[in-house]
Amino acid sequence: MDGMKNPSPSDRLISALDDGLRTVFTPTRASRTSPAAGMAPPALSTAQAREAGALMRVNHVGEICAQALYQSQALFGRTDALRRHFEQAAQEELDHLAWTADRVAELGTHTSHLAPLWWAGAFAWGSLAGLAGDKWSLGFVVETERQVEAHLASHLDRLPAADSASRAIVDRMKQEEAAHADAALAAGAAPLPAPIRGLMRAAAKVMTTVAHRV
């Protein structure tokens, strides 16, 4: 019983890897209704549907990365409270993962073929942040979520005006990513050095560029 209440580091690692496999290979079911629920299918041209699908594929990859980041940071969190913070955030982000996957399918395209690679890369980033210490791990969350918030804002500009379903999902995600950043700040996040922020932006640029196509 004690082992169940206080899992060992190896148990937590196995659990994180199991969560990762589920994230990448198992369809996710949302716990909340999609913001796009009940909306009539928009009348999109072939080109518009293709672009919307590519943008939502990128957003789905972002949610795979979010799961990996939170899973790894929970793994290396120093306190139970911080681990619970990351686990709760990951649970909320699961809805985003499900919403974007469903929307990608509705738009007649596929999620990224490189999902395992994206998850592994993000898990490595999150592990480094977690090992650096709790305030830096939280700072990493803040910077990540601020960049994601800006990225989603750009997608609202790029999505077809008629695609109200995709736009509703992206807008809700943007609001909730901002809330996650605020929560991490309130929990004691330290601001990351400028070179680290720049490196994160460069990595995100590679991911969004490749995922838009593959």
Image (tube, rainbow, N blue to C red):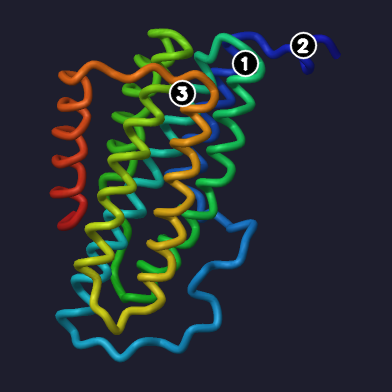
Q: Amino acid at mark 3?
A: Ser
Location of residue 89 by image quarter: top right
Q: Residues within 10 Å of mark 3 (few under 14, many from 20)?
A: many
Q: Amino acid at mark 2?
A: Gly
Q: Is residue 11 left or right of residue 203?
A: right
Which is more N-terminal, label 1 or label 3? Answer: 1
Q: Identify the residue under disc 2.
A: 3
Q: Identify the residue under disc 1.
A: 11
Q: Residue, x 29% and y 59% (percent of image)? A: 57
Q: In the rendered structure, are the residues bearing label 1 and label 2 in contact, judged by CB atoms less than 8 Å apart?
A: yes
Q: Residue, x 25% and y 61% (percent of image)? A: 155
Percent from the top left, x then y, of residue 158? Answer: 19, 67
Q: Which residue is at the front of the view, 97 or 108?
A: 97
Q: Is residue 169 above or below residue 134?
A: below
Q: CA distance from mark 3 to mark 2?
A: 20 Å
Q: Is residue 22 left or right of residue 53?
A: right
Image quarter hosting the C terminus? bottom left
Callout 1: SS? helix
Q: Is residue 159 above or below residue 76?
A: below
Q: Which residue is at the front of the view, 87 or 64?
A: 87
Location of residue 84 by image quarter: top right
Q: Residue, x 29% and y 29% (percent of image)? A: 121
Q: Residues within 10 Å of mark 2 (few under 14, many from 20)?
A: few
Q: In the rendered structure, are the residues bearing label 3 and label 2 in contact, judged by CB atoms less than 8 Å apart?
A: no
Q: CA distance from mark 3 to mark 1?
A: 13 Å
Which is more N-terminal, label 2 or label 1? Answer: 2
Q: Identify the residue under disc 3.
A: 72
Percent from the top left, x then y, of residue 24? Answer: 42, 44
Image quarter hosting the N terminus? top right
Percent from the top left, x then y, of residue 117? Answer: 28, 36
Q: CA distance from mark 1 to mark 2?
A: 9 Å
Percent from the top left, x then y, of residue 137? Answer: 42, 18
